[in-house]
Each structure stands twice: as structure tokens, then as C-alpha cells.
Amino acid sequence: MDKEPITIIGLEKLKEELVFRKEKKRPEIVSAISEARSHGDLKENAEYHAAKEQQSHNEGRIEEINDLIARANVIDVTKLANEGKVIFGSTVFLVNLDNDEKVNYKIVGKDEADIKNKLIYFKSPIGKGLIGKNKGDLVEIKTPAGDKNFEIKDVKYI
């Protein structure tokens, strides 16, 4: 069973989702199944089948979250000495050398990744291209959209 790196915020979000799915979602689905059952013949009861499918999906996700929490290797970068190296959990401030655009990313685990919120998976092309590099480095990263060239302006452990 491999440990999966995760930030403190990522672990908290997983725990919140687990509570939501167990205490709110599960009872809602059970109630929907019960309501659908009261309508009689289950073979042709779309509401019943939809609710059962929802239940299966919810229980699967609960199992997945429990597994992730069990395998979580919480990394708190705020407790580490910052020597300007890009590591899991660090926030990297970059300048795209191709268009002069400034961008920053936080390097996170799989379940936390959300590109819209500048959270990138450490095993993604950009994540892999940045980990181990240092403040001031010029980095060329091969992405599905083509090669990108960055300068690492700053690395923060926040």
C-alpha cells in the first residue's frame, strides 16, 4: 500500500467530503430509494434505479476517500527550511518566457489537483518539470500543448 503525499488542506477537504457523503448524502439516497420503492414495481421504476446507482457511486467514493486517508502522507511545507527548491507542497512563482505571463502553481497530490485554482498534480508534466528545480532556474517543460519555457522567480513554502 503506497503512501500518497497530500497537503494539510487536501487532507482536511477529504475529511469534509467524507463527513458530507456519510452524514448528508447517504441518508438522502436511502430516503430516495425508500420513496421510489413505495411506488411499486421496481423493474420499470427509473427513480429506484437512479437512486441505487447514486448509492453505488456514493459508497464507492466513501471507500475511495477512506483509502486515501489511510494512505495519506501529510506533508507540511511550512515546517521545512526553504532553500528555494521546488518540492511537493511548495508554491512556485513563474514567468512564462514565451509570452512574459506571470503564473504561480502549488504542487499537490492527485486528489487536490485543480488547474483552475492553480493546484497542479506533482506527477503532471509541469509538476514533474518543476520538482527539484530551484529559484532562478530556467526550465523547459514538455506539455501536451507543446514545450513551455519558464523562469522560476520564487518558491514559497506556505
Image (cartoon, grey):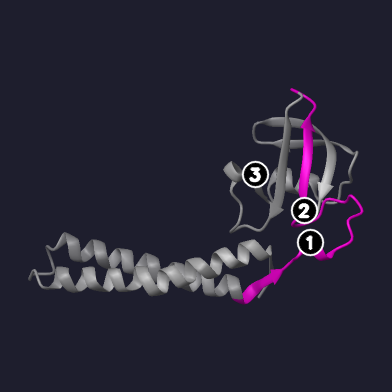
Crowdedness of circle 1 by 10 Å Cα count: few (<14), some, many (20+)? some
The amino acid type, in three-letter code, at marker 3 is: Lys
Residue 73 among magenta residues? yes
Q: Is residue 86 left or right of residue 56?
A: right
Reading the image, the residue beneath label 2 is 90
Reading the image, the residue beneath label 3 is 118
In percent of width and height, residue 29 lies at 28, 69
Q: Is residue 97 left or right of residue 41?
A: right
The amino acid type, in three-letter code, at marker 1 is: Val
Residue 30 among magenta residues? no
Which picture quadrant has residue 57? bottom left
Tags 3 and 2 in contact by the CB under 8 Å rule?
Answer: no
Boundaries of the magenta span: 70-99
Judging depth in this view, the residue of 52 and 78 nearest the camera is 78
* Mark-to-mark CA distance, 3 and 1: 17 Å
Q: How many numbered marks are there?
A: 3
> Element under label 2?
loop
* Label at residue 77: 1
Tell me the quadrant of the picture where the N terminus can be found: bottom right
At x 66%, y 48%, the residue is: 120
At x 41%, y 69%, the residue is: 21
